[in-house]
Amino acid sequence: PATEAPVVEVTPVPATEAPVVEETPAPATEAPIETEAPIDPPAGDTYYEKVTAIEDGNYLIVNEASSRAFNGLDAANDYVAVVIADGKIADANGAAIVEIAAMTGGYSLKITNGDKAGNYIYGKSGANSIQYGAEAVANTITFADGAATILSNETSFRYNAASGNDRFRFYKTSTTGASYIVPALYKEVSNEAPCEHANVESRDAVPASCTTPGVAAGTF
C-alpha cells in the first residue's frame, strides 16, 4: 500500500524590526544681536567741542541754555539752533564760524562764512552793538565756569535772552541783568584720520645727478 510522506511543520522565524535610531536635534543657535556703537566723535568731516582754554582755531559762539549759536548778524531774534550732546555739536547748522587768532593785546575774531564773511568783530565803547571791520581789533578772552568772557573796548560779548530781543552782540559792561548771558566757545575739530607715515618731514626737492646712459634724471 502507498505511504504518505510525513508532514514536516516549519516553524516561522519571528520577524525582527529594525532598531529605531533616535536623532538628537542640534541645539538651536540664536543669531547674534548686533548693536551699534555710539558715535563718538560725531560723524562728519568736522564737529565742534566745548573748550575752556583758548588757542588759534575756528569756533562757534553758543548760548548753551537755549542751544542757540551766533550767526554773525546783529539783529533781534537772529541766531541759529544747534544740538548739543555730551559737550559736542555735530552740525553748525549755518552758525557763524569765527576764526580766533592770537594778536598783540589779545585775540582777533573773524567771521569766515555767511553774510559777514571776512569781517573782524569787536565792540564800541559806550554802545551795545557789533562793530564789523577789515582790520583786526584785539579782544581779551577769559574763562570761568565753562563760559567765555570776551571783552573789547569796555564791552562784553553776550547773549540777550530777553523775549523778543534774543541776539548776540557786544554789550556795555554797565549793561547787566539775568537776561545777559556769557556764552561758551566750541572749537572745530577735524574727523580726518592723521597721516600714518613715519617720515612726515617736508623737504625741498633736490635735482638728481644721474648720468647713466638711457636713464632719465628726475627729482626726489
Image: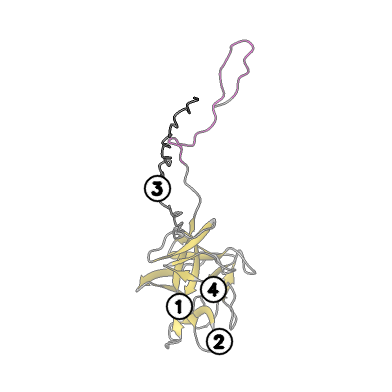
| Residue occupied by mark 2 | 165
The vertical placement of 168 against 162, above or below, is above
Q: Earlier in the sequence, mark 3 or mark 2?
A: 3
Q: Which label is found at residue 70?
A: 4
- For the residue labelled by badge 2, is the local secondary structure a helix, a strand or a loop? loop
Q: Earlier in the sequence, mark 1 or mark 4?
A: 4
The vertical placement of 215 against 124, above or below, is above
- What's under tag 2, amino acid-wise? Asn
Q: Earlier in the sequence, mark 1 or mark 3?
A: 3
The foreground one among 128 and 69 is: 69
| Residue occupied by mark 1 | 156
Magenta span: helix, strand or loop, mainly? loop
Label 1 neighbour load within 10 Å: few <14, some 14-19, many 20+ = many
Magenta span of residues = 196-218
Dividing the picture into quadrants, the one containing residue 217 is top right
- What's under tag 1, amino acid-wise? Ser
Label 3 neighbour load within 10 Å: few <14, some 14-19, many 20+ = few
Q: Is residue 213 magenta?
A: yes
CA gap, disc 3 to disc 2? 77 Å
Image quarter (top left, top right, bottom left or bottom right) of the C terminus: top right
Q: Earlier in the sequence, mark 2 or mark 4?
A: 4
- For the residue labelled by badge 1, is the local secondary structure a helix, a strand or a loop? strand
CA gap, disc 2 to disc 1? 17 Å
